[in-house]
Amino acid sequence: MSKKQDILDAALRLFTENGVRATPTKSIATEAETSEALIFKHFGTKDQLLEEIMKKAYQAIVRETTVRLAGLSSKEYIASMIELPIILTRSNPDFWRMQYKIMPLNPISSRYHENFMRPCLLRLTECFEDLNYSQPELEAELLLIYIDGVWKYFAANQPDAAKEKALVELIKQKYKL
Amino acid sequence: MSKKQDILDAALRLFTENGVRATPTKSIATEAETSEALIFKHFGTKDQLLEEIMKKAYQAIVRETTVRLAGLSSKEYIASMIELPIILTRSNPDFWRMQYKIMPLNPISSRYHENFMRPCLLRLTECFEDLNYSQPELEAELLLIYIDGVWKYFAANQPDAAKEKALVELIKQKYKL
DNA sequence: GTCTATAATTTGATAGAC
DNA sequence: GTCTATCAAATTATAGAC
């Protein structure tokens, strides 16, 4: 099982550097110190290799977040969503660095992210309704745009913990949390 | 000059669909109804073709923004920066759709954008200092993260004018503008 | 599970004519 | 300025042996 994992790790590193399309399977094989053929034996195609990376990562993400976001009040849910980028990028920085680089152009990557995010928009709308915001749907959409922006910033720039915390507190402040 | 422009237009369309790397020069030639050789005669390489697209677009952007952002008070400057995504994506929606898709992975694309954005961070910091915010540098950074997020949202989703306006007003409201 | 060798395409780029 | 023809390299994927 070691070689299979080596390939997954190497692919993550190289996809992050150059994107999926610009990473030859030959490079992945060299980086993983294995043969190119083994990649295809294990995963079928390069896209299925990416699919495998996504599946494993989002399984872990769902595992982490369902506990964290369950049974919260409206204010607590909003606060937890604002904290999400910090929680998830710390838990798997390498994956998120790749994810935010390839998402805009890669349908597999963006599909996984949208499936994860969809329920959050609905729940956030309810929260803002509950708190009597005048345009709850728009507020929910805007907050998700913000969260996405911060997420991308954390993933790309990997600021130190103090700065991450300071930014997140500043956002919460704007929502009086 | 018509064929040269046809190539630039075709490249913009195809780079937006699939990214630069995944767009063969052959496809650009077909889409532009010309020969592949002409692309190389006019632009040298595929990257230089992209460089030309960027140069022209950012020249127009600088032309538009220098007038709009000159001689403003701190409050006015912040408000104008918040309006920037709406102004620029409306003025050239196709370019921005491409730009926000390819930026994370394309060094040419991201270089042009960073060069344009760098001065804004400095100026925004001064504005927040002037308005006695307690963490002006962090506020400036956060606002730019927000602006980038909204910009990307407008570029990718192209919402109608009413929704764009409503979102921008909501942001201004959070900065009491 | 893993490798070597190789097939089959695709792709960026050039030569040379008009 | 523009085209046809073409090359050399890169790239995905497979066959077959150990």
Image (cartoon, coloured by chain):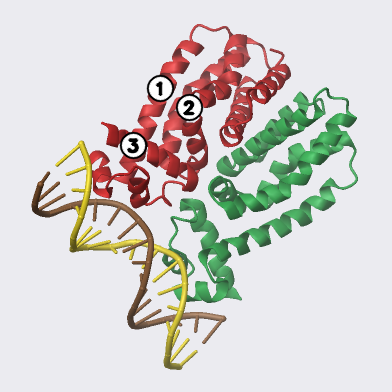
Chain colours: A red, B green, C yellow, D brown
Q: Is residue B145 left or right of residue B7?
A: right
Q: Is residue B35 visible?
A: no
In three-dimensional space, the C-alpha distance between marks 1 and 2, rounded to whole angstroms, equals 10 Å
Vertical order, B27 against B139 (above or below): below
Callout 1: SS: helix
**Residue holding disc 1:** A60
Q: Amino acid at mark 3?
A: Asp
Residue B108 percent across, percent down from the top left: 60, 55
Q: Secondary structure at mark 2?
A: loop
Residue count near mark 2 (Cα–Cα under 10 Å), binned few <14, some 14–19, many ≥20: some
Foreground residue among A157 and A116: A157
Label placed on residue B41: none
At horizontal 24% and vertical 48% (from top left) the residue drawn is A37
The image quarter in which residue D3 lies:
bottom left
Q: Residues under labels 3 and 1: Cα distance?
A: 19 Å
- Residue sitting at x 90%, y 31%: B130
Residue B104 visible to an observer of this rendering: yes
Q: Measured from the top left, where is residue B38 in percent x and y?
A: 50, 76
Q: Are marks 1 and 2 in contact (CB under 8 Å)?
A: yes
Residue B128: percent from the left, percent from the top?
84, 30
Q: Locate the N terminus of chain B and report the quarter of the image it occupies.
A: bottom right
Camera-side residue of B102 and B14: B102
Name the amino acid type tagged 1.
Ala
Residue wearing tag 3:
A6
The residue at which mark 2 appears reads as A92
Q: Residues within 10 Å of mark 3 (few under 14, many from 20)?
A: some
Type of the residue with mark 2: Asn
